[in-house]
Amino acid sequence: MSIRIGPEGRAAGGQAQPGSEAPGEMVRGEGRLVRRDPGKEDRASEPCWPPGGATLYLPAPTDSRWLAVVTRRESRDYEFLALNLLLTGVGLSLIRDPSTSNLEQAVQRVRALLARNGHSPTVQRDVARMFGGE
Amino acid sequence: MHELLSVEEVARRIAAGKALVLAGDEEALAQLPRGTWIGGTTPYFMTERGGLHSRDLVFATEAGAADQARIVVHDGASLSQLYTEIPDHGYGVVLMPLFSEAELAFAVGAPSFDGFASRPLVGWVAGTDLTDPRHPEPKVFDGTTGRALTQEAVAMHVTLPASAGVEIGIVNIFTPSDGDVLSFPEAGFSAREVVVGGKRRSFVDYLAETGLDVRRPLVGEYCGAGLNVGIREVDAAGGVVQLWAPVFPGISYRHAAPVGDYVSAFLARAPRQVLAAGSAGLAFCCNCYSNYSHGELEGKRTGPFVGPIVFGEIAYQLCNETLVYLSRSELPPQAP
């Protein structure tokens, strides 16, 4: 299991600063560091699922896959209780206010929650359900 | 550590510098010395020996050393800051009296609080001995001052060691039946109208026509989690149904399916790894009085889940008829 390292150099295991990554930061993936180039399409950094290991990868906040997550366009049953409750709340909020700013805020909140709890096997399974890889 | 103790033993642990979350009868809690503890009234407990009732003993859950815990009292207005007070690496425990202003504010408002669900928050709603003819008021205690509170909530915010992590879990033995999907146009602890099949109608009339067993709760759907709303009273004359937790617009509810043996149901629905870790793997646990009563849990054990029997449970927000626990584990070592 590798955990994405934030700009502070700390693993997202409850002590990272969620949602704080910036373009061009060094990220650790399966024992090596790669540089993300600023301006490149976030989708270019696809998650990888090497045999025998698992990678917790959270797409950048601007990744379009988050839209399906926060609007529940693709319904999934998640296990992490905080995620269940937060997605319910942001989903209802987005029905009331579908503005871009509210959508961005919703994505940030969900992403931050997952990053903060990335050490949890429950969260890891839920992220796999969200973005594939199970 | 979670144990049913004498008042004297709890006092020793307070003096020894432990941070404690306590449950017991008011008279027992009132005897305790000041220290780093919070408490709430209930005389019902689930222990290693099974469910039992006691006015003399106190259930103690140890939250660590006193210098790792901070206690805050909140009224209904300041509760909205609760989540922002929880340590970045830690958790919060909040207790509030049944039918208090704090309970009302928390139950309805929590999903809108700043930082809702961003950090672990557990807790419970204090009640009283239902056989006590004096009908005392439910209370919570701020152990730092010894004050007993009837309208406020008291919270303990615990900082965890860097090597430890916690995760909230619930065991809800109630599953949605195949009946109608219900929704409610307004949030609150009472409901006059329900929406069924897209049509608004009297909730009292709906319950009467369908004959639903009101001892079983409604189960709300939360992206894969089921949260219960217990039915407290059907006031046919007043045309209103009183509830043990608020319903919220936008949430779909179904009446719960029947449950057979409660002990079997709890053990069947609890995660295997939590059962395997035993009570030593739990930093907190509580279960609902409704389960204790309807499930006839006095004298029966519910596996490793020991703790107070309470009148509302908190797992980020108010729950009903639910077993709530906080599991504790060692975090993987940080990469160099």
Image (cartoon, coloured by chain):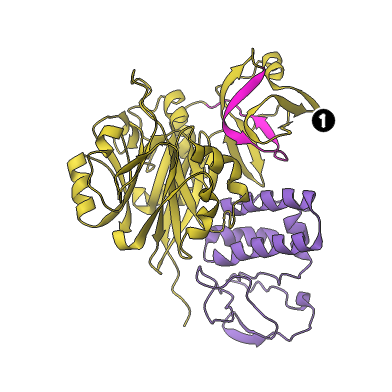
Chain colours: A purple, B yellow
Q: Position of residue A121 (x, y in %)?
A: 53, 61
Check residue B245 for magenta coloring.
yes
Element at badge 1? Answer: loop
What residue appears at the point 23 percent right and 32 percent down from the top-left corner?
B56
- Left or right side of B318 for B238: right
Choose between B105 and A33: the one closer to the eye.
B105
**Horizontal placement of A71 versus B79: left or right?**
right
- Residue A64 in sight in this render: yes
Across and down, in percent, residue B59 comes to 30, 41
Which segment is the magenta one?
A: B239-259
Packing grade of label 1 (10 A; few <14, some 14-19, many >=20) is: few
**Amino acid type of the residue that numbered disc 1 sits on in the rendered structure:** Gly
Quarter of the image where the N terminus of chain A is located? bottom right
Is A41 rendered above or below residue B42? below
Could you tell me if residue A134 is visible in this image?
no
Q: Chain of mark 1?
A: B
Query: Looking at the rendering, which quadrant does residue B125 occupy?
Result: top left
Q: Which residue is mark 1?
A: B198
The structure residue drawn at horizontal position 25% and vertical position 35%, both measured from the top left corner, is: B28
Residue drawn at x 34%, y 17% is B133
Residue A86 position in % (x across, y down): 64, 53
Work out which quarter of the rendered image holds the C terminus of chain A and state it: bottom right
Q: Is residue A114 left or right of residue B323?
A: right
Q: Nearer the viewer, residue B314 or B48?
A: B314
Up-down relation of residue A36 to residue A14 (above or below): below
What is the x, y in percent for residue B130? Answer: 38, 23
Mark count:
1
**In the rendered structure, does residue B309 fall within the stretch colored magenta?**
no
Q: Residue at x 26, y 38 (%)?
A: B30
